[in-house]
Amino acid sequence: MTTLHLAQGAKASRILGVGSFQPERVVTNDELSQRIDTTDQWIRERVGIAERRYAAKDERLVDMAVIAGSKALADAGLSPSDVDTVILANCTMPTPIPNGAAQVADRIGVKAAGAFDLNAACAGFCYALGTASDLVRSGSAGRVLVIGAEKLTDWVDQDDRANAIIFADGAGSAVVGPAETPGIGPVVWGSAGDLVDMIYMRDDKWIYQEGQSVFRWATTQIAPIALRALKAAGITPSDVDVLIPHQANLRIVESIAKKLRANGAREDMVVADDIVHSGNTSSASIPMAMDHMRAAGRIKPGDVAVLVGFGAGLSYAGQVVICP
């Protein structure tokens, strides 16, 4: 009987560096109110957004991913040749073929990389991070560049008041590599395919979501996923320094934080609120928030963070990480 050899992977994995990119154009609530029937107060009260960033027409998803990925490599002190795999989480590429990851890898200088796109919508970064961690630990990859990037404005009907106020563009990235002690906990993921009609493409060209239904689902189902991720990592809510959920809606973020505190999380747990100035950037929102919080001094290396993404599918995923 033939016996196959298996690759020898790392003992554990961790995030080695992070980076992000946002387009220059800032779009305020007042600017949106000139086009659609809304106000700054109405938007802030319902979703917590004050402003968001829109990419230029000639600014592509791949362009943003390249910049964010390059920044993460620089932050990790690595060169492109130190990476052998690129995962691009997104749900807004203009066409399914060719994939974006191979284009990003080539432009950054990661030659002959394993490269693939991953679509779990707003849970995409957590899915990709979990996949990257497992690749490193199995020996299938040495170091993985994980990027969440979206150009949602290509897919949003700007006359749709309910959705035009929410979505924005941007990219966030992390480098995953080997470690002696775990820096990325087990991914806890799942889906609710019976609720697929809550978020879908209207007329095959516009993102549409049943806002109230999504809100109820997220505020009841996502905090338990975060608690499951903590249990899988062998820690308790009181060990958490930072909560970084997908930046879908500030009220959802606050609800998740409240439920974690009700289960033992500390009052001084730092909670990501990047949505206020970045809007909902789907798979880019978690790594972007982490990078922005670190730059602002709100988190520091060694902090214990729980990440949890959720969105269309309906898909969800979460894991505990040690901040780089």
Image: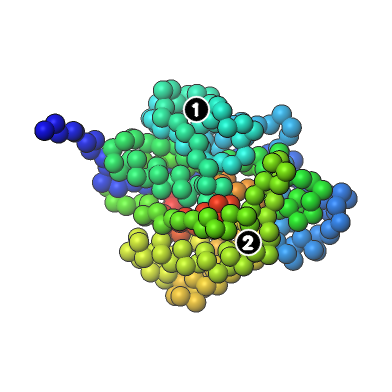
Q: Residue at x 30, y 47 (%)?
A: 12
Nearest to the observer: residue 235 or residue 127: 127
- Indicate left or right for 10 with 251 as reference: left
Circle 2 — which element?
helix
| Coordinates of residue 18 in the picture (x, y in percent) | 49, 43
Give the amino acid type for the residue marked by disc 1 in the picture. Ala
Foreground disc of the pair 2, 1? 2
Q: Residue at x 68, y 55 (%)?
A: 209
* Quadrant where the N terminus is found in the figure: top left
Q: Is residue 145 depicted above or below 250 in this figure?
A: above
Q: Residue at x 58, y 65 (%)?
A: 217
Nearest to the observer: residue 171 or residue 186: 186
In the image, which disc is placed on residue 135?
none
Circle 1 — which element?
helix
| Coordinates of residue 240 in the picture (x, y in percent) | 43, 65
Instruction: Specify the farthest residue to the right.
Output: 34
Nearest to the observer: residue 293 or residue 61: 61
Nearest to the observer: residue 90 or residue 79: 90
- Disc 2 or 1, which lies upstream in sequence? 1
In the image, which disc is placed on residue 102?
1
Q: Is residue 146 depicted above or below 268 in this figure?
A: above
How far, Cα to Cα, is label 2 from label 1?
33 Å
Q: How many marks?
A: 2
| Coordinates of residue 173 in the picture (x, y in percent) | 51, 41
Tell me whether circle 2 and circle 1 mark residues in contact (CB < 8 Å). Answer: no
| Coordinates of residue 318 in the picture (x, y in percent) | 45, 56
Q: How packed is label 1: few (under 14 Cα within 10 Å), some, or many (20 or more)?
A: many
Report the residue marked by disc 2: 214
